[in-house]
Image: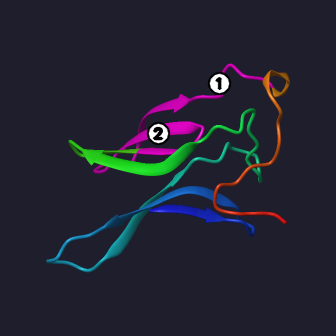
Protein backbone atom coordinates (compact mmCIF):
# COMPACT_ATOMS: atom_id res chain seq x y z
CA UNK A 1 0.00 0.00 0.00
CA UNK A 2 1.35 3.47 -0.79
CA UNK A 3 2.06 5.60 2.26
CA UNK A 4 3.43 9.04 3.06
CA UNK A 5 4.30 10.14 6.61
CA UNK A 6 4.85 13.88 6.93
CA UNK A 7 6.06 13.79 10.56
CA UNK A 8 9.49 12.57 11.65
CA UNK A 9 10.59 9.98 10.87
CA UNK A 10 9.56 10.91 7.33
CA UNK A 11 8.50 8.10 5.02
CA UNK A 12 7.49 8.14 1.37
CA UNK A 13 6.96 4.75 -0.19
CA UNK A 14 4.99 1.54 0.25
CA UNK A 15 4.25 -0.89 3.04
CA UNK A 16 4.14 -4.55 2.00
CA UNK A 17 1.77 -6.86 3.86
CA UNK A 18 1.41 -10.63 3.90
CA UNK A 19 -2.23 -11.40 3.15
CA UNK A 20 -3.14 -15.06 3.47
CA UNK A 21 -6.53 -16.38 4.50
CA UNK A 22 -4.88 -19.22 6.47
CA UNK A 23 -2.70 -16.93 8.63
CA UNK A 24 -2.83 -13.54 10.30
CA UNK A 25 -2.54 -10.31 8.31
CA UNK A 26 0.96 -8.92 8.97
CA UNK A 27 3.38 -6.27 7.78
CA UNK A 28 6.39 -7.70 5.92
CA UNK A 29 8.60 -4.71 5.06
CA UNK A 30 8.76 -1.08 3.88
CA UNK A 31 9.83 0.11 0.44
CA UNK A 32 11.14 3.66 0.63
CA UNK A 33 10.92 5.93 -2.41
CA UNK A 34 12.59 8.77 -0.48
CA UNK A 35 16.22 9.54 -1.28
CA UNK A 36 18.61 8.51 1.48
CA UNK A 37 19.60 11.40 3.72
CA UNK A 38 16.77 13.71 2.62
CA UNK A 39 13.96 14.44 5.04
CA UNK A 40 11.91 15.89 2.21
CA UNK A 41 11.77 14.72 -1.38
CA UNK A 42 12.20 17.36 -4.05
CA UNK A 43 11.75 16.99 -7.75
CA UNK A 44 12.88 18.69 -10.89
CA UNK A 45 9.60 18.35 -12.77
CA UNK A 46 5.92 18.49 -11.82
CA UNK A 47 5.08 15.39 -13.90
CA UNK A 48 4.92 12.43 -11.53
CA UNK A 49 4.03 8.77 -11.66
CA UNK A 50 0.89 7.79 -9.79
CA UNK A 51 1.41 5.52 -6.78
CA UNK A 52 1.05 1.97 -8.08
CA UNK A 53 2.27 -1.51 -7.23
CA UNK A 54 2.43 -4.59 -9.47
CA UNK A 55 3.06 -8.13 -8.22
CA UNK A 56 4.17 -10.96 -10.48
CA UNK A 57 6.62 -13.89 -10.33
CA UNK A 58 7.42 -13.25 -6.66
CA UNK A 59 8.45 -9.64 -7.31
CA UNK A 60 6.72 -6.38 -6.41
CA UNK A 61 7.34 -3.37 -8.64
CA UNK A 62 6.37 -0.03 -7.09
CA UNK A 63 5.97 3.29 -8.89
CA UNK A 64 5.74 6.56 -7.04
CA UNK A 65 6.60 10.16 -7.95
CA UNK A 66 9.78 9.82 -10.08
CA UNK A 67 10.98 6.32 -9.15
CA UNK A 68 10.25 2.73 -10.09
CA UNK A 69 11.60 0.02 -7.77
CA UNK A 70 11.48 -3.77 -7.89
CA UNK A 71 11.84 -5.99 -4.79
CA UNK A 72 11.88 -9.74 -4.30
CA UNK A 73 8.99 -10.69 -2.00
CA UNK A 74 10.82 -13.69 -0.51
CA UNK A 75 14.14 -12.02 0.30
CA UNK A 76 12.72 -8.47 0.60
CA UNK A 77 15.76 -7.15 -1.29
CA UNK A 78 15.80 -4.52 -4.00
CA UNK A 79 16.33 -6.03 -7.45
CA UNK A 80 16.56 -2.85 -9.50
CA UNK A 81 15.66 0.84 -9.57
CA UNK A 82 14.74 3.34 -12.27
CA UNK A 83 15.09 6.99 -11.25
CA UNK A 84 13.36 9.15 -13.85
CA UNK A 85 15.18 12.24 -12.53
CA UNK A 86 18.64 10.62 -12.63
CA UNK A 87 20.07 12.95 -15.29
CA UNK A 88 18.06 16.05 -14.44
CA UNK A 89 19.20 19.08 -12.47
CA UNK A 90 17.41 21.87 -10.70
CA UNK A 91 17.94 24.07 -13.77
CA UNK A 92 16.08 21.69 -16.11
CA UNK A 93 12.63 22.80 -14.98
CA UNK A 94 10.84 24.68 -12.24
CA UNK A 95 11.78 22.96 -9.03
CA UNK A 96 9.19 23.15 -6.32
CA UNK A 97 8.07 21.10 -3.37
CA UNK A 98 5.54 18.50 -4.50
CA UNK A 99 3.28 15.96 -2.91
CA UNK A 100 0.39 14.25 -4.55
CA UNK A 101 -0.96 13.29 -1.09
CA UNK A 102 -0.65 16.72 0.59
CA UNK A 103 -2.19 19.97 -0.59
CA UNK A 104 -0.83 23.26 0.79
CA UNK A 105 -3.08 26.34 0.89
The residue at which mark 1 appears reads as 86
Residue 69 tag number: 2
Q: Residue at x 28, y 50 (%)?
A: 74
The percent coordinates of residue 34 (x first, y second) are 64, 48
The percent coordinates of residue 57 (x first, y second) are 20, 42
Answer with the quarter of the image where residue 21 lies: bottom left
Asked whether 96 or 83 is in front, the reply is 96
Q: Secondary structure at mark 1?
A: loop
Q: In the rendered view, would you say 89 is above or below 67? A: above
How far apart are labels 1 and 2 at the CA level?
14 Å
Counting labels gives 2
Q: In the rendered view, would you say 6 is above or below 25? A: above
Q: In the rendered view, would you say 95 is above or below 39? A: above
The percent coordinates of residue 71 (x first, y second) are 38, 43
Q: Residue at x 79, y 22 (%)?
A: 92
Answer with the quarter of the image where residue 66 lies: top right
Q: Quadrant of the N terminus?
A: bottom left
Toward the bottom, the furthest residue is 24
**Segment tinted magenta in the rendering:** 62-89
Toward the top, the furthest residue is 87
Badge 1 vs badge 2, beta-carbon distance below 8 Å: no
Query: Which of disc 2 and disc 1 is earlier in sequence?
Result: 2
Q: Residue at x 71, y 39 (%)?
A: 46
Amino acid sequence: LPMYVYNKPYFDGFIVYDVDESSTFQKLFNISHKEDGNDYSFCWDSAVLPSRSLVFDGKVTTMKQHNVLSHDLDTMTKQWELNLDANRTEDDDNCFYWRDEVIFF
